[in-house]
Image (tube, rainbow, N blue to C red):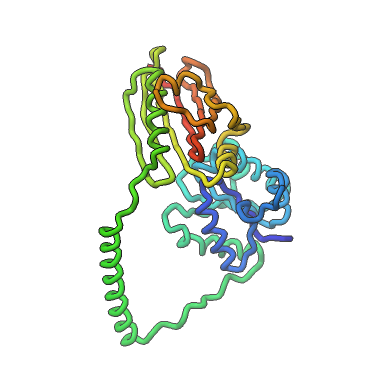
Amino acid sequence: MSRDIFISYSHADQTIANKVCQRLEEAGFSCWISSRDELPGEQWAEMIARGVDESKIVLFILSNHSNNSPACVKELALAHDKDKIIIPLRVEEVILSQKLEFFLVGQQRIDALTAPIEKHLSKLIDALSQLTKRPPPKDTRPPPLPRSRKKKYLTYGAVCVAVLILIAVAIFIIFPPPQPPDPQLVTFVNYEKASIGQNGPITAWNVSWPAQNSVTINGAYNSNNGTTWNFMVTATKFDSIADATAYLNDHIAGYTLNPTTPNPAGPLGQASGISVPTAYGEYTQSTGSANSGNQVQYKIYQWGNWISIRQDQQVLT
């Protein structure tokens, strides 16, 4: 089935991709998006190839996540080979990686850097209308009200807004939002600190709980060989192991979790005194060389449906 637009994005930007897809389809465009259009039993490579083949234009949601996504690079390479029109929609300030720069250099991009993203999509719709030779959607808004009626409705509207604000404040006081994080994530953070502490004294440690389903950890430690390592850990909760695996494949090429291996890291769990879940995995990918000042290591942990990606960067002291 022919589509107007193939939406290429990182799974970490799923919410943004859904909003863009919904707005484009409201404007009359047919979209292909992997989260909805995957066929049962279809392999990822086969699914993406089919989606690109069926679409006239590839809309690439450019963010810090997609800029470093091996899967997104493969999608753009396929679109380039098939001579598809590629439109970058930049949702974050980002410096293009070398791999993406090859496919996007010279492409006219559309910026949507501030929230809400919906306010930036009219320009995207106009551009897509020109490319697909489709007239832009008609303005279906009703004619403006007479001044007297407008003033009356504005007064009513202000009263309604004030009442809604009072109701929202009362609900917040009576029913305060649940406090993150859940106990399993607290255990993970304690484990992470204990494991880092084995490598040398921790010189900085900052934990942020932006939402119930995510956590970020930033800091540094002095390793036993006399160098300093800066680290950044991001942890995200998923609805299923399949979703978590897709997220890992999107970030670390070739990652495979072996849930039958209880603790590949060995002494870390024992030294921290924390029980390591059986559904636990670790994958390490290093770039650069030891003691060179530019070595980066990636480690991935799985605690049930909690997935963390840790990046360590060596800094010579």
State which quarter of the image contains the C terminus: top left
Residue closest to the eye, 248 or 132: 248
The x and y percentages for residue 197 are 37, 21
Residue 113 coordinates in the image, percent (x, y): 44, 52
- The quarter holding residue 206 reads top left
Q: Quadrant of residue 268?
A: top left
Q: In the image, is residue 81 above or below residue 7? A: above
Please tell me which residue is depicted at 67% across the width and 42% down the height of the picture.
77
The one nearer the camera, 131 or 61, is 61
Q: How many marks?
A: 0
Q: Nearer the viewer, residue 169 or 123?
A: 169
Q: Taking 254 as reference, is 272 left or right?
A: left
Give residue 41's position: percent from left, percent from top.
Answer: 71, 48
Q: Name the residue: 72% across, 60% down.
A: 2
Quadrant containing the N terminus is: bottom right
* Residue at the spot 60% in from the left edge and 52% down from the top edge: 35
Residue in front for this viewpoint, 64 or 236: 236
Q: Residue at x 32, y 23 (%)?
A: 203
Residue 270, given in percent of the width and then of the height, sits at 44, 20
Viewed as shown, does residue 12 lie left or right of 191? right
| In the image, residue 41 above or below residue 168 | above
